Structure formats: C-alpha cells, structure tokens
Image: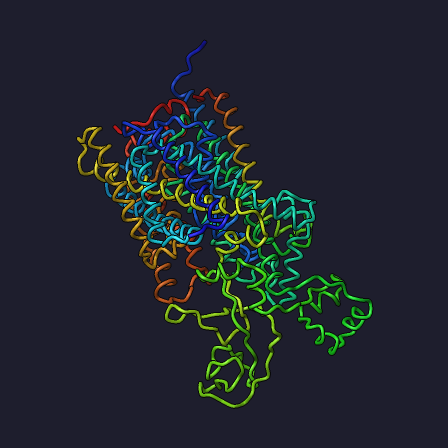
Amino acid sequence: MSLSPTEIWTYVLVILSFGGYLYIGYANRVRDTKGFYVAGQGIPPIANGAATAADWMSAASFISMAGMISFMGYDGAVYLMGWTGGYVLLALLLAPYLRKFGKYTVPDFVGDRYYSHVARTVAAICAIFVSFTYVAGQMRGVGIVFSRYLKVDITVGVIIGMAIVAFFAIIGGMKGITWTQVAQYCVLICAYLIPAFFLSTRLTDNVWPVPQLAFTFSDLAPRLDALQVDLGLKEYILPFTGKSMIDVLCITIALMVGTAGLPHVIVRFYTVPSVRSARYSAGWALVFIGLLYTTAPAIAVIAKYNLLTTLTGAARQELTQEQIAAIREGDAAQIASMGLGEKTVKAIQEGERTWYFSPNPISAEQLRQNNRWIPAWETPKLLVIGSDKGLGEDGQVYPQSELVGGTQQPVAWLGKDGKPTDVRPTWMRDGGVTIAPGDAFRVKDDRLKPNPESQNEVYIDNDIIVLSTPEVAKLPPFIVGLVAAGGLAAALSTASGLLLVISSSFSHDIFYRLIKPDASEQQRLLVGRVVILLAVIIAGLLGIFPPAFVAQVVAYAFGLAASSFFPIIILGIFDKRTNNYGAIAGMSVGLIFTIAYILGAKTFGMPLWFFGVSAEGIGTLGAILNFIVAFIVSHLTPPPPKEIQDLVESVRVPRGAGTASAH
Amino acid sequence: MEVPTSSQSQERMQEYWRKNITLIAVLLGIWALVSYVLGILLVRGMNTFEIGQLPAGFWFAQQGSIYVFVVLIFVYANRMDKLDKEYDVHE
C-alpha cells in the first residue's frame, strides 16, 4: 500500500498531536477529588479561556459551521451570534457568582441553593442527558474524520478516539483535561486560520490576507451574492431567505441562553483561582472563540464561491454598452440568449451592475478529471455530481437514470403516470452540471436517487466546505493533514469536557451527595474514574450506532439547558425570594414544554404552532415559562430559610472565594 | 479607623449590589442592541448603510456583534475590579 503525501502528512500530524495529548494528560495526573473535578482551582484565566474555547468548539463548530453558514447566507448568523453571545451572559450573570459559591458541579449549586434533593436530582439527570446527546456527536465526528482522511473504518476511528479520551480523562481528571484542551485549542485554531489566510490572500489578489478584513472590506460576499443570483439560487446577503424574523430571533436567543446554561461550559469557571479571574476568563474564552467564529463567515463565502465557480465554470463577464441598453429596454430575445434570470435583469436595469456571471458548462466527467478531489469526496457521498437532467414536454424534470433501458441515448422516458413514453422530451442538456434550488438527490434504500422535482444536479454536504477547502484551493498536503488534526482536536476536547460532567454529575451529585455521603476521598475518586470509563464506552457506542436524537443535538442540548438550568441559576443569584417550590416547578414546566415541542416538531410532524418557531428556537419560550412559573410559585409559597438568604448574600461579593469544598 | 457598624456595612453592600446591577443592565442593553436589534429586528433598515463593502445589518449579524461582545466582557471585568476595591470586597 502506498501512501499519498496528503496521507503521510495526516498520519504524522495526527500521531504527533495525539502523543502530545497523552503526554500532557499523564504529566497532569491527579490524586484527589478537587483536582479531579475542578483542577484544584489553579488554572490561570488565559489558560482557562483557551481550555473553555476548545471545550466549547466542537466537531460541529470546526467541521460543519462554515458549511451551514455558506448554505444559509445571512440566516447563518443565528449560529455566529448564538454561540458567542452566551459568554456575555456567563461573564455578567453567572460565572463570578458560581465561582464564589465554589462547589464542584452545577447540580451542586441547584441542590444547595434550593435546599432540595429533588432539585439536585433533576439537575443531575438533565446534565447527564444533555451531555450524552452532545458527546455522541463528538465521537461520531472523530470516526468521520478518521474515515475520510485515513480510510479507516468509522468504528475503528471511534474506538481510537475513545481510547485517547479515556486515558487522559481517567488519570488526569479535570486538570489533565484542561491542559490537554489548551494544547488542543492551539492545534485547532492553527488548522482553521492557516488555510483561511491562504484563501483570503488568493481571492482578494493579495490585498486582504486577514479573513475578517477580507470579509468586510473586499467584495467577496457581494460577489458570491451576485453569483448565486445569476445561477438562480437565493441571495446570500438578504435576510430571512430561509427562516422568518421571529424564528431567527428565537433561535439566536435560545442558543445564547443555552450556551450560558450548559453544564460543561459553566463548570469551567469553577476551575479558576478567584472571582476576578472567572470574569476575565470568560473574556479570554470569547476572544479565543471569536477568532474562529469571525473567520467562519469568511471561509463560508470563499469556499462556496470557489466551489460554485469550479463546478459551473461561471466567470465574471463585463456587459457591452449595447447589451446594457438592450437589457434596460427589456429586450426579451437578448435576455433569453444570455440566459439571465429575473433578478439579474433587475439589477442591471437598476444600474447596480454592468456585469454578470456567464456560465461555461463543464461535463461531470471533465470535472472529475480536472479536479482529483471530486471523486475522492464522491466516495463518502459528501459531494455527488449527477448526470444531466432534462425538461420533459410535460414541464417535468427527468433524471437520466430514469431512462428506460439504461443506455446513454434516450430510448423512452418515464411519463407522468410512471409508464414509459416515446415522446422525446425537450432537453435542457447543456452538457454541463446544473446547480439549482432544491435537492439534487433523494436517499432511497441508502442510495442516492436523482430527484425529478429539481433541476439541481449536485449534492453538497455542509461538512465538505471546511474539509475540502485546502484541496479545492490546491493548498499543500501539509495543510490538508493539519485540518484533519484540527477536526480531531475539536472533537476530542469537547468530548473530554462532557465526559467529565457526566462523571461528576453521577459520582459527585448522585453517588456521593445522595447515596453514600460518608464515602471516603479514595472511594469517591475511584467512582469518578470508573464512571468516566463507563461514560466513554457508552458515548463510543452512541457514536458507532447513533440514535435519532443525536442528529437533533442543537435542539435538545441547547433547548434543555436554556429551559432548565439558566433561569433557576439566575433567579438563585439575583432573587433571594425564589424558593425550592418555585425552582422545581419552573424547571419542570420549562423542561416538559421544551421536550414536548421538540419531540412533536422533530419526531411526530407537529405543526410549528408557536409563530412557526422551529425546534431549535423553542428553548427561548421554555426559558421564559420557567422564569414566570418559578417567580409566581415562589411568591405564593414561604420564602427560603435565613441561611439560604445568607448564602445568596455571600455569593454576591467576591471576597472570601477561597477554595471549593465538598462539605 | 472607625469600624463600620453592621447596618452601615449592610447599606454599603446594598449600594455595591445596586451599582453592579446598573452596570450589568447597561452592558446587557448594548448586548441586545447590537445582536437582536441591529442584527435581526432592524436588519433591513440597517442594510441601507454600509460597513466596508457589506450592508451594515449583515455585518453586525456576522461580524460586528461578536467584537462588541468581547469588549463588553472586558469592560465589565475592569469596572468590577474598581467597584470591588471601592467597596473593599476584593479578594
């Protein structure tokens, strides 16, 4: 077996980085529960910021987000704002006070502040469910990166990932995880930024090497917007082309509030030495996260522009004065001969443009020959280029595969009634690959079948935008390998943070606080380690055999975090009057409502009755309900006891943060 | 130095907390303005202005709001450092 330079570089970089993580995990092994759960509270703010950023940015942020944005255009802002804005809430409303409270977990705060084992248990189960939903996707991400770059089976990839995470999480606990995450951040951010710099430099003719500046000050986005319009796709910059305004608003709020309520994010702020460092640490975290999140929209634009122009051969063409004059007069023959769409004509008539993208059809075979990366990505079905489709005389689009007899020449066509017909369709065959709105293919029996309802001939997976970018842009093999190592770093760092939450929720909140309060330090540490091992195994199994809910991770994880934890933690700090009854009622109502809506919308085809707000955004309403119910119930029942009110007083002032104690 | 009585110190604490809440309210107001208002609710109107080569609403939604978020957190941390010292509750 001979390896290509790309594969050699990928192996070298993946093995080197994995070796580094194992070494760091070993060097930071821990001997007590405080080190295991909160890294001994000795992590400096900047390092905690980097660890938080790595913990936060998952396989989805690294691999999928730029792709999602490039297909959503403006509407992709829900992820950009939603997954960053929550850090402002964390820094201003949660992190400093929870650090002052100074215990080990989120259920710890809920249980103590609301003096209730019921509240503690609900919170612990919630934390475990949210984290498992999230971690399964990470293990899947590890498997996918392995299978795509190293031709290893997904299952083998997941098992390798499990072994690595288990090693440093079990011996290093939170301390090992934190310092490994710092290293993982460095790998993933380099892997993201280096190709982005190369691409920006190239696409702006060496004017703007910094992707953020290229995005703002060059014509990258308007150019893509025009290209999409000329190809008959929707505008890129125009808002609300895919989602309504209220849906965009609700999803953004739900993602922000959910971020601030996710246990694996909150717990990071228990690991710093003081209240002051908790505040700064949230700022550093957002600086490190923002580096990737402000680069993503630039990559989205550049990569989609590259991909669309490569596939369609479209090139910018200046219009002659005669052509402009003809179009302004509405010369139908001229417009039709140039193949201009309605929106393009309007832009030219209104004087916004004196140019257009003229198509230069390239056949699928030619494309595969000229671009070696196309067949490579067709195998895992990340990019599929179909054969020509044509318009029948009945106005329907037909795929070539529905040609009866299966030869290259049309012999007979399937008619509207599904029976063969001799009527020769009026072909729209231009010899090239057509990109149009709608799905090019439908999945049938695990195979892609051309979809006769759309003229689209190309299927592009979200993930390919980041994964294929170095190859599309013909960057050196070293960078391709770096992107693979970066994707793995993103998935592993998030997985390890989540596994620790699962372990601490079970071994600390349930085993130690509820089942066996007299457990010795040694027993508790042992249980913590055994639970991590079990959690890694379950997470791996979920990654190999993903259940349906894993695909809805955004809806479930953020919706539940937003509707359960966030409101009662905020009330616990800012309203002394909120009591155990209010908290339990609020959490229950928020959770049940949100789960019911998501289940209904995603699984049972329920109409989106709340102003068309999708499952991803309903956590916003769940959180509001939680706030209202908790507030009303608290005021109808007796106030919390004096010592709880004193506890609230004490978390409000920084002095005396000291160290975490389990007693 | 005079030792403050218990009720005096309680009043001081309440004042400290009020100032903290005011600061939080102002900063979260800006937070909501750049993201929800400029980036979503008024995006169509904002898009009639330009920042660089981009419509302003689109820019706030995909770039600007994130920069503002970072600044807000550091402003808060910095102001609270001063407030903590002023009310002698720093660590």
Q: Quadrant of the C terminus of chain A?
A: top left
Scheme of image coloration = rainbow
Q: Is residue A447 left or right of residue A202?
A: left
Q: Is residue A563 above or below residue A189?
A: below
Outermost residue toward the top in this view:
B1
Q: Is residue A354 visible?
A: yes
**Residue at figure coordinates x 29%, y 27% from the top left:** A661
Q: Nearer the viewer, residue A114 or A493?
A: A493
Q: Is residue A254 visible?
A: no
Q: Is residue A542 above or below residue A317?
A: above
Q: Position of residue A114 (x, y in %)?
A: 29, 38
Q: Is residue A202 left or right of residue A410?
A: right
Q: Position of residue A152 (x, y in %)?
A: 38, 52
Outermost residue toward the right in this view:
A321
Q: Position of residue A372 (x, y in %)?
A: 54, 58
**Residue at figure coordinates x 50%, y 34% from the top left:** A284
Q: Position of residue A157 (x, y in %)?
A: 36, 50
Q: Nearer the viewer, residue A662 or A472?
A: A472
What is the total number of numbered labels drawn onto the structure image?
0
Q: Is residue A587 left or right of residue B29?
A: left
Q: Quadrant of residue A637?
A: top left
Q: Nearer the viewer, residue A419 or A284?
A: A419
Q: Nearer the viewer, residue A631 or A368?
A: A368
Outermost residue toward the front in this view:
A1
**Residue at figure coordinates x 66%, y 71% from the top left:** A341
